[in-house]
Image (cartoon, rainbow, N blue to C red):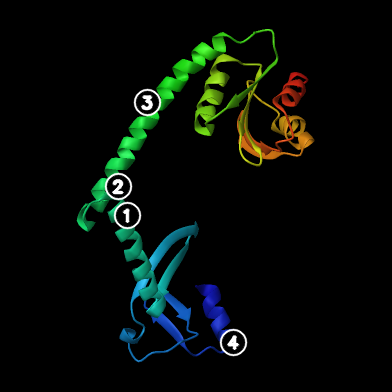
């Protein structure tokens, strides 16, 4: 606020909008005789950028009207998909979300039980394990469970897609060297990735085989 007032004095800006004891802003137009000429103003998002700075995105005038039309079309499409009247859209979506969360909990429980059985078949003398998977979300659960069972070994999960491998790497060490792992198992083969803690996710070209990754992982 102080710097704005200083700039106003330096630039000799005479037009300004001031709300006493709250804020003062330089006014660059456009000017109207009354706010009704602006038309509808719809706030689209409010985001805190940093302390004391908030970004507000809005649509006004015909842009605001277009946004309302788009918003209504989306709501109408959702209503048709859910087969409910407008006033029940919120409750229907909320119900679906709760059902989805409950299914997710049940899925995780089943995968964790499967993981315990799977890991019990692993040869404990091996340094690394490479598996092909069909579901990436299931792979994430397997990776987390692997870290609970193995403290010094490596698990690489590979899901084949049309043009690449999606990869999850779990390294069971307290301080896993992510850069070394990414360099040896991803970048070396033309892939890329990143992550936090002991789990890395990335991509590899389809030309890379699980056998190639197995050999590279054993050397880590």
Residue furthest front in the image? 162
- Residue 113 placed where, x, y %? 45, 16
How many residues crowd mark 3 within 10 Å: few (<14), some (14–19), many (20+)? few
Give the residue drawn at x 76%, y 30%.
184
Task: Name the residue carrying label 3.
Answer: 106
Classify residue 17 as left or right of residue 140.
Answer: left
Do the residues bearing badges 4 and 1 touch, measured as CB atoms within 8 Å?
Answer: no
Task: Name the residue carrying label 2.
Answer: 93
Give the residue drawn at x 40%, y 65%.
44
Do the residues bearing badges 1 and 2 touch, measured as CB atoms within 8 Å?
Answer: yes
Which numbered marker is on residue 11? 4
Q: 124 or 83: which is nearer to us? A: 83
Which numbered marker is on residue 161? none
Spatial CA distance of label 4 from label 1 is: 52 Å
* Vertical relation: 26 (above or below) 105: below
How many residues crowd mark 2 within 10 Å: few (<14), some (14–19), many (20+)? some
Helix, strand, or loop for circle 4? Answer: helix
Q: Nearer the viewer, mark 1 or mark 3?
A: 1
Spatial CA distance of label 2 from label 3 is: 20 Å
């Amino acid at each position: 606020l102080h710097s704005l007032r200083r700039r106003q004095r330096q630039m000799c800006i005479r037009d300004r909008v001031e709300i006493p004891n709250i804020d003062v802003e330089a006014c660059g137009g456009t000017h109207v005789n009354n706010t009704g000429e602006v038309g509808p103003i719809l706030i689209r998002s409010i985001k805190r950028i940093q302390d004391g700075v908030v970004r507000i995105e809005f649509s006004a005038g015909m842009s605001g009207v277009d946004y309302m039309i788009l918003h209504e079309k989306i709501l109408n499409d959702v209503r048709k998909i859910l087969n409910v009247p407008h006033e029940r859209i919120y409750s229907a979506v909320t119900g679906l979300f709760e059902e989805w969360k409950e299914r997710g909990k049940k899925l995780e429980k089943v995968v964790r039980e499967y993981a315990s059985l799977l890991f019990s078949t692993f040869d404990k003398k091996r340094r690394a394990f490479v598996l092909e998977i069909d579901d990436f979300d299931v792979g994430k659960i397997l990776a987390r469970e692997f870290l609970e069972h193995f403290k010094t070994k490596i698990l690489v999960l590979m899901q084949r897609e049309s043009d690449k491998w999606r990869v999850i790497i779990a390294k069971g060490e307290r301080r896993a060297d992510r850069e070394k792992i990414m360099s040896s198992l991803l970048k070396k083969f033309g892939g890329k990735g990143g992550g936090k803690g002991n789990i890395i996710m990335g991509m590899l070209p389809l030309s890379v085989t699980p056998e190639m990754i197995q050999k590279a992982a054993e050397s880590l």
